[in-house]
Structure formats: structure tokens, C-alpha cells
Image (cartoon, helix red, strand yellow):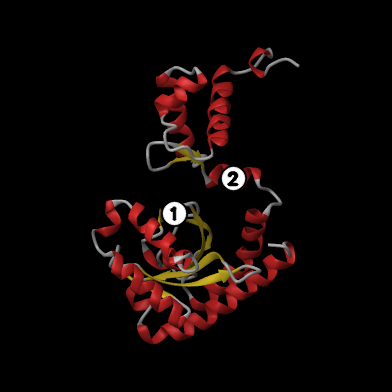
Amino acid sequence: MIAPKELPHTVPVVHRTLQVIQTIARSQGRANLTAKALAAETGIPSVTCYRILRTLMAHDWIRPIPGGGHELSLGLLTLVQQGQPLEGLIAVSRPELAKLAEKIELTVKLSIRRDDLAVALCRHESPKETSVSTREGATFPLAEGSSGAVLLSRLEPKEIAAILQRMPATCWKHQTQQIVQDRLKFLKKNGYCVDAGIFNPSHYAISVPVLGLNNEVIASLTAIGFPNDLPNSRHPKLKKEMVLCANAITRRFRELNPTL
């Protein structure tokens, strides 16, 4: 069989890009797989390798990890997982998010955990002309916000503590680890969690868990609005509507993937 690089009428830089992606995929999140290490391992010139990495990161095909390494990111995974659980979750969630957003008149999103990050998998905007928006594919540390708390909530205490220790310093500019633990306690007691503008005073959020077959948290369902959209008096009603939506997503997802 002719090696790809030996085939006629091909583009060398594309071969190099695919070589970078394949090397990162095989590395399984090696923290020491830096740009310099990638260049040495693949034989690609350092400047070219750096530019390939920056391009792939711009398209969310790879992402940096603590220690300077890299791993595959959501933008690439959604392309290659057609028909797989992630794509199925998106498919069953979109209509439910649309119904919820229309009913509660808030922007809603579904987030999943990727290592120490929460990733906005899909969302539906509020029907209001002026509302808080969010971007699909956006990531943030698990220590931030109500959706991060939901994604942490069913983990073992030791694992939660380890994750919080790995969080970047920016997570602790406006909160402490105790505040995160308090959010987790509130969630366990009340079935929902609130972020009252800790990181952005004009953005409030409320989240509930989406559960899998064994009652594990597979995603976080979050509604986002301005402070006047989420007064404390509205929380119980919002929780009720959001739990109904989360249950509908769980039910439809289980129908697609009865063993998950």
C-alpha cells in the first residue's frame, strides 16, 4: 500500500495536520505532549507545528491541557461521532431545550463534563428580544457556575477535591472552595443549583442534573438570564419546569441508548 505522503496530487501541509491530530489522539492526553515535543515526535518543523496547533485550536479540534499538552476537543469529536451517544444526546435535547426556552423565556443550554471542564453541548436562545446568550462549544472550569456544580455533584469527595485543586487561579478570584462545596450541598438538598452572578453580576443561572440509566449525571441543564429574570421567588417554578425537561431528555436518550 502506498503511504499517504507518497500519493500524487496531495497537499503536504494537510498530511502534517493529520499527523498532528493522529499523534495527539494516540497520546491519550499526555501532559508533556507540548508543541516542541509534537514537532520532535512527528518530524514537523517547530514553526509549522505551532501554526498547525493554533489553527486546530481555533476550530476547537484540539485543546490545551494542564502541563502544556494537548488533546482532542469537542469540535472534532462532534464530526466523528455521528450516530454515537454524544450526537444522540444533542439530537434528543434540541427540541426539549426549544420547548423549555419558549416556556420560561430564558436562554437554556445543556453542558457535559470533559475532564476538568464543562462544555456547552447545545443551547436554545430566549424568545425575548434582550436576553443573555451563550455559545455552543464554550468551555469553563468545573469550579465555576451552577452547571459546573451539577457535573461535579455525583463524583466521590476525593475526586471533587482533586479537581478543585487543579483549577486555575482565575476560579478563586471571586469565590473560595468552600463556596463551591456550599453549592454542592445546596444542590444535594434542593435538587437544583444557582449562580447568582458570582463571575458576571449581570448573568444569573440555575441548573438541574440530567441523569443516565444508573442515575449518574450525564449532563447539566441550565437556564440563564439577567438578575431580574431569576429572583429567588421564581426558583421553585423554574426547577419544576427544568426537571420536567431534564426527565424528557433522559427518557428520549435512554430510548436511543438503552444500555447507557
Residue 126 percent across, percent down from the top left:
48, 68
Kind of residue indicated by mark 1? Leu
Q: Is residue 170 visible?
A: yes
Residue furthest to the right in view is: 1
Can you say whether 96 is above or below 64 in the image?
below
- Give the number of the mark in front: 1 or 2: 1
- The answer to whether mark 1 and mark 2 are in CB contact below 8 A is no
Kind of residue indicated by mark 2? Leu
Q: Nearer the viewer, residue 186 or 138?
A: 186
Residue ID for mark 1: 117
Q: Nearer the viewer, residue 235 or 178?
A: 178
Rendered image: mark on residue 77:
2
Residue 211, by quadrant, is bottom right
Distance between the alpha carbons at the discs numbered 1 and 2: 15 Å
- Which residue is depicted at the point 48% across and 75% down? 105
Q: Is residue 252 left or right of residue 165?
A: right
Residue 203, by quadrant, is bottom left
Can you say whether 130 is above or below 53 in the image?
below
Residue 228 percent across, percent down from the top left:
34, 78
